[in-house]
Amino acid sequence: MIADAYVPSVAALLATAGALAAVTLTGFVVTRIRRAAAARSLAWALVFASIVGLHFGLEGEPPGFRMLALISATLCAMKAVVAVEARASGVPPLDVRAWLAFVTAWFGMQPRLFASRAGGGRAVRHAVRGAATLVRRGLARVALGLVLIALARWTWVATGSHLGASLLLLPGISFVLHFGLFNLNAALWRARGVPAYALFRNPIASRSLTEFWGRRWNLAFAEMTSLAVFRPLRRAIGPRVAVAAAFLFSGLLHELAISVPVGAGFGLPLAYFALHGGAMLAERPLSARGHLAGWRGRAWTVAWVVAPMPILFHVPFLRAVVWPLIGMV
């Protein structure tokens, strides 16, 4: 049941809140360090320390809560990493208010949005115009997601099919969260003059894996891996190896979010992203020869995203974290 998967002890809840506050404030201090090398090292140390501390500090707590805590800690700490990299490229450091807004109230990974919050009137007018559209889309996606989740529950009760219920439940959760609440979050910031944007942009229209991962699916993650991994490594080891490293890094973070909380399925999310890194590298010569033009590019993308998905969302994770949301046992 949902309580068994997500409701922690009071002590764990308080400890997690304190840890997240400490990570946020420490990250702010790190971003003010002028020496880029020292700031970069400390930012990555903060990522490691926050993950390890919460992992061992929350042993015995429900897996769903551990997942949320680890994701939150990683997100907060990685904000320091991307902010340090952004400052090295010329983006001014955020003041306290902008930093707290960036870390605690926005899922994206571009500090420059909040560094330019006091920008000109044109940005503010554009933000206001875009807010209403994002609100409409967000509310529609939340409604659709809730319908799918309700249908998943009905399917489970009526048929007892884990597969049938999961095929409805996973998209339902994504519609509520990724396409619904994230859009509403962006709308809020646009209304306040920050040029925030949708982080998930019609991924079904992707004509290649490059387009899917780089411009349509989870732009926050794409921004993070680009700023923190790909760009720093590109000059040192070349773009192809940097792409592979970025996908391996993504795989490790998904291990942290999926396998670590349930203590099972280790290596499977990493394998999913390793496959995608290889497919991305193979895609470029295929596209250059015209083999992925038109419908073939869309079919290629859908096949790579969907076919290996069972190794990303493996059964131990579904059983411990996802299925309890609708009372599946």
Image: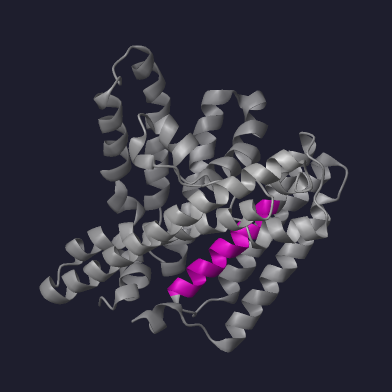
The residue lying furthest to the top in this view is 289
Examine the residues drawn in magenta and state their main secondary structure.
helix
Q: Residue at x 20, y 66 (%)?
A: 162
Place residue 45 in its image quadrant: bottom right
Give the extent of the magenta segment. Answer: 63-79
The quarter of the rendered structure image containing the N terminus is: bottom left
156 relative to 35 in the view: left or right = left
Front residue of 245 and 208: 208
Front residue of 113 and 308: 113
Front residue of 219 and 60: 219
Q: Is residue 73 magenta?
A: yes
Q: How many marks?
A: 0
Residue 6's place in the image compared with 76, above or below, is: below
Q: Residue at x 30, y 71 (%)?
A: 323
The residue lying furthest to the bottom in this view is 10
45 relative to 264 in the view: left or right = right
Residue 103 coordinates in the image, percent (x, y): 68, 58
225 relative to 261 in the view: left or right = right
Q: Residue at x 64, y 61 (%)?
A: 105
Residue 107 coordinates in the image, percent (x, y): 58, 55
Residue 307 coordinates in the image, percent (x, y): 25, 43
Residue 102 visible within the image: yes
Q: Is residue 303 magenta?
A: no
Residue 133's place in the image compared with 59, above or below, is: above
